[in-house]
Amino acid sequence: MNTMIDIQDIGKKYQINSGTSYLSLRDVLSRGAGRFLKPGRKKKETFWALKDVSFKVGEGERIGIIGRNGAGKSTLLKVISQITPPTTGQIQINGRVASLLEVGTGFHPELTGRENIYFNGAILGLRKKEIDRKLDEIVAFSGVEQFIDTPLKHFSSGMQLRLAFSVAAHLEPEILLIDEVLAVGDMEFQKKCIGKMEEVSRSEGRTILFVSHNMSYISSLCNKAILLEKGSLVKEGGVSEVINEYLTSIRKPFESENHSSNQHNDTVKLLGVRAIDQNGAAKDSFSVNETIRIEMRYEVLRGGSVLWLGYNLHNENGVNIFDTHSVNTELYRKPHEKGVYTAVATIPPHLLNTGNFFVSAAIFNHLERIIYVHEKDITLFHVHDVLDGITARGMSPADFPGIVRPLLEWNINKNE
Amino acid sequence: MEQIKTIIKPSSRTGLHLKELWQYRELLYFFAWKDIRIRYKQTVLGILWAVLQPLGLMLVFVLIFSRSSIAQAAGNIPYEIFVLSGLVIWNLFYTSVSMASESMIRNADIIRKIYFPRLLIPLSATAAALADFLVAFLLFLAFCLFRGQPVHVSALICFPAGIALLLLSSFGLGTLLSALNVKFRDFRYALPFLLQFLFFATHIIYPPSMVPDSWLRQVLALNPVNAAIAIFRYPLDPASADLSMIMMGTASCLLLVVVGLLYFRKTESYFADIV
């Protein structure tokens, strides 16, 4: 088997700038002056988004890259697609690469559907002749034929996505990098795209690197997987084996001792995050009619700061179900004193649908624009259906659709 | 099928990579094409604006200055031809530089998501500005015909040479500013001021002879737009030629291109991280 991509000891270091990522001249000047006045004081903080990652990708392999948010998956694809240079290591690539880090990149609302296909196709690496040849097929696949010569701004967002996916599905490089692009859009059309990509990759031996939070897409599209954790490659192997490893690694409640955490501040330390039930017992599986509590333990090392606590919840498809902040606590406005604290957020029963939910936790203060701690996909819990008792599903068979599954109050009155 | 091999190493991009730029020439065309399409979408007059702008400005300057000593000093050509030739060239410079310097930020979402030689972006801004210019240039030729202005046969060389010098200068400055703009957003605010300043430092509405023969004339000769305009005007008024100004302007144009390209190359690989 030919090696298509040979990745050797790739590392990528970022400098952490607080606030905006770009600078103004004034910042640089004042910083320069500061350095002059207090030499050696300012030390730039850095962190490694990728560290010593090595693996080989053979021809026709379809590799799923999984890991928590912030594990380095997207950075890895960006390095392979030459968008950003690595800090260490070397990659050798044999073949034409197309990277699909976002569908519809470069779409412009003032251009027509047809014009957007040409421009989008061109930046994704298609030649004009290839687009000419495939145009009818792309348009037909998208199902928006009748609007193809109207400006994109008159398209619904769903139609824009369909058009973008259609261009993407018709790329024909030897190596295709796909990042999470299927997390949006309607399910039916997503399946059509996955089907098309599968078909092409199987019949033509296309090499694919695929990043997704959706484990079912990974297992249907890929024949190999790698697991990244905090920038390092921790497992490489069969798809189901790696997915299992990933799910068990995050199903455990988060304890800071078990993690080489990248918390680097002297104000607050996150000690642990876990899901507990009404009685305070740690659990990783809840029924839909059960109260779920998410508990965070943290230690304030230096008193005097106003700390906000927050969680966000993502489902298996990477959809953000909700964000929640500690707004209705006294400590939302008052500074914390030194000490260890426990914060609990309560998710009422009958809110979440069934499935796996990934919890991310943060300690921050938006007013001061400081994020002290942000641990993505720190723990996971599962919500399952129950057969007894009233739930929103009622007597409907099979899975109940929807991102949430609230049990709403209904009233029916017979009109006189 | 050709086998493409790529080696990715920690930022080691030196040299111009002209071969790679050539491989991506179609994308250059698409970027320029998109810029032009978007600029004139939803305008009734479309690319006619490229004609109306210099024409309107010419009227203003002619109304104000045609009886003044400035117009008398313009040499052997009517003041309106003098002004229009300057404005047409200046507009190419203005459009090209202002579009190029904003171009990296305008295309930030593409830069963060897709790889291609970044130099295509400021380059395409210059190319798109050229489209506007060609329309305005036709207007200028028509106006010369209408006024019965004799054009020396050297125009066959001088017109393209002047335009080429101007394109190079605007590409150099535009590339430099586009890279600076990514890192320091200050330049976005400094640019209108810089361009306004350059407008008055260019022999558009007044001839070089109006400037006292002093250090000021030497400084103005460093402005490459002056050299481009001097070359462009030569076939209209061969007596006006000032060779030393053309030489100095050409030298500073080349310097601008070198500095622009070097700085762009130096910062290019990190654009995706900071843009």
Image (cartoon, coloured by chain):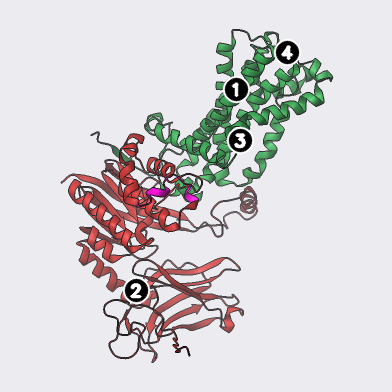
Chain colours: A red, B green
Q: Are marks 1 and 3 on the same chain?
A: yes
Name, please, the residue furthest toward the left. Answer: A1
Where on the picture, by quarter, is residue B28? top left
Q: Is residue B19 visible?
A: yes
Could you tell me the amino acid type at mark 2? Pro
Residues tagged 1 and 2 counted as in contact (Cβ below 8 A):
no
Chain at numbered mark 1 = B
Could you tell me the amino acid type at mark 1? Phe
Q: Identify residue for label 2.
A: A401
Could you tell me the amino acid type at mark 4? Ile
Could you tell me the amino acid type at mark 3? Leu
**Above-or-below relation of A88 to A70:** above
Q: Identify residue for label 3.
A: B45
Front-lying residue, B182 or A199: A199
Front-lying residue, B125 or A164: A164
Q: Identify residue for label 4.
A: B77
Q: Residues within 10 Å of mark 3 (few under 14, many from 20)?
A: few
Chain at numbered mark 3 = B
Q: Calculate the distance from the C-alpha at mark 4 to the C-alpha at mark 2.
A: 79 Å
Q: Calculate the distance from the C-alpha at mark 4 to the C-alpha at mark 3.
A: 31 Å
**Above-or-below relation of A258 to B254:** below
Q: Residue at x 28, y 68 (%)?
A: A246
Q: Earlier in the sequence, mark 4 or mark 1?
A: 4
Chain at numbered mark 2 = A
Name, please, the residue furthest toward the front. Answer: A416
Q: Is residue A87 visible?
A: no
Residues tagged 1 and 3 counted as in contact (Cβ below 8 A):
no
Q: Residue at x 62, y 33 (%)?
A: B49
Q: Identify residue for label 1.
A: B137
Q: Calculate the distance from the C-alpha at mark 1 to the C-alpha at mark 2.
A: 63 Å
**Which dot, 2 or 3, sits closer to the camera?**
3
